Image: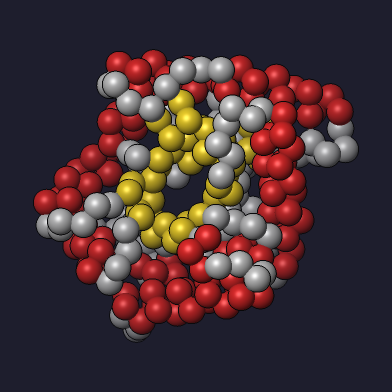
């Protein structure tokens, strides 16, 4: 089996190649190493190899892992919540994470705003949207937003309510593409998310809208070609997960 260092080198080479194809600077893409289900020791090894951004999807697991990792390094690390969050765990997420990728309801946004304000901070969030229309995917309903005026109006209505909440900084959008045999099949989903961000940035200029969090192990090269600024890669770096 290849080592973590070898797997990481392969991913970084692939990211660089995708940036070159898209005529983008390498620094325009942030690699988020998805460390969920992997032990703190693997994360510490990854820090030693230069990684600084890590993604977790369960606050219970992360709340134990993050302090262990931070106690073993002097590097400043950024922790990303990438998984679905139950509203009752919003306070814990605000306390543990630097960036939240999976904001998918107004109720959750209101709780994040309240708990961030109580903590004296502004929460960096990305709106998770379901562009593909898959029933199994979380996110604000956004399938057909370009063709269906009614769907677009409903989506805009929710986002408008989120954008006026205090203590939230909307940094952009996140989505998950369908699992497909050929990564090229994900391109329309990623392209649609990019166009959605452009439309929202125009209509809601108070948001930062700087980021597109899209692309995982099986499809990140296409996501980068379509404008991803954050890619969430776990298996290609850490190997298969042990549950």
- Identified at 61% across, 63% down, the residue is 224
- Colour mapping used in the image: secondary structure
Q: Position of residue 200 (x, y in %)?
A: 69, 34
Q: Quadrant of residue 90?
A: top left
Please state the total of marks drawn on the protein image: 0
- Identified at 36% across, 55% down, the residue is 53
User: In screen coordinates, is 144 left or right of 59?
Assistant: right
Residue 242 in view, yes or no: no
- Identified at 46% across, 74% down, the residue is 11
Q: Nearer the viewer, residue 103 or 39?
A: 103
Q: In the image, is residue 37 above or below residue 222?
A: above
Task: Please identify the quadrant where the N terminus is shown.
Answer: bottom left
Q: In the image, is residue 175 above or below residue 162?
A: below
- Identified at 27% across, 71% down, the residue is 49
Q: Position of residue 24 (x, y in %)?
A: 61, 67
Extreme residue in the left direction: 71
Residue 129 in view, yes or no: yes
Q: Nearer the viewer, residue 223 or 178?
A: 223
Q: Nearer the viewer, residue 161 or 44?
A: 161
Q: Position of residue 232 (x, y in %)?
A: 48, 57
Q: Quadrant of residue 243?
A: bottom left
User: In screen coordinates, is 178 left or right of 47?
Assistant: right
Q: Nearer the viewer, residue 202 or 45?
A: 202
Q: In the image, is residue 72 above or below residue 59?
A: below
Q: Position of residue 208 (x, y in %)?
A: 55, 36
């Amino acid at each position: 089996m290849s080592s973590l260092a070898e797997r990481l080198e392969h991913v970084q080479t692939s990211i660089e190649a995708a940036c070159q194809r898209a005529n983008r600077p390498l620094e325009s893409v942030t690699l988020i190493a998805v460390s969920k289900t992997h032990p703190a020791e693997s994360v510490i090894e990854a820090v030693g190899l230069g990684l600084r951004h890590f993604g977790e999807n369960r606050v219970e697991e992360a709340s134990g892992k993050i302090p262990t990792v931070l106690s073993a390094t002097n590097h400043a690390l950024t922790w990303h919540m990438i998984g679905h969050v139950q509203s009752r765990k919003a306070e814990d997420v605000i306390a543990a994470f630097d960036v939240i990728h999976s904001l998918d309801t107004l109720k959750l946004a209101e709780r994040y705003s309240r708990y961030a304000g109580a903590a004296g901070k502004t929460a960096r969030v990305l709106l998770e949207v379901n562009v593909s229309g898959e029933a199994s995917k979380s996110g604000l309903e956004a399938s057909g937003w370009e063709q269906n005026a009614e769907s677009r109006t409903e989506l805009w209505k929710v986002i408008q309510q989120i954008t006026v909440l205090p203590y939230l900084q909307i940094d952009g959008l996140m989505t998950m593409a369908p699992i497909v045999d050929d990564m090229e099949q994900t391109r329309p989903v990623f392209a649609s998310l990019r166009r959605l961000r452009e439309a929202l940035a125009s209509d809601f200029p108070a948001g930062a809208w700087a980021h597109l969090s899209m692309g995982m192990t099986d499809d990140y090269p296409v996501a980068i070609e379509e404008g991803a600024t954050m890619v969430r890669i776990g298996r290609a770096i850490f190997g298969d997960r042990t549950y």
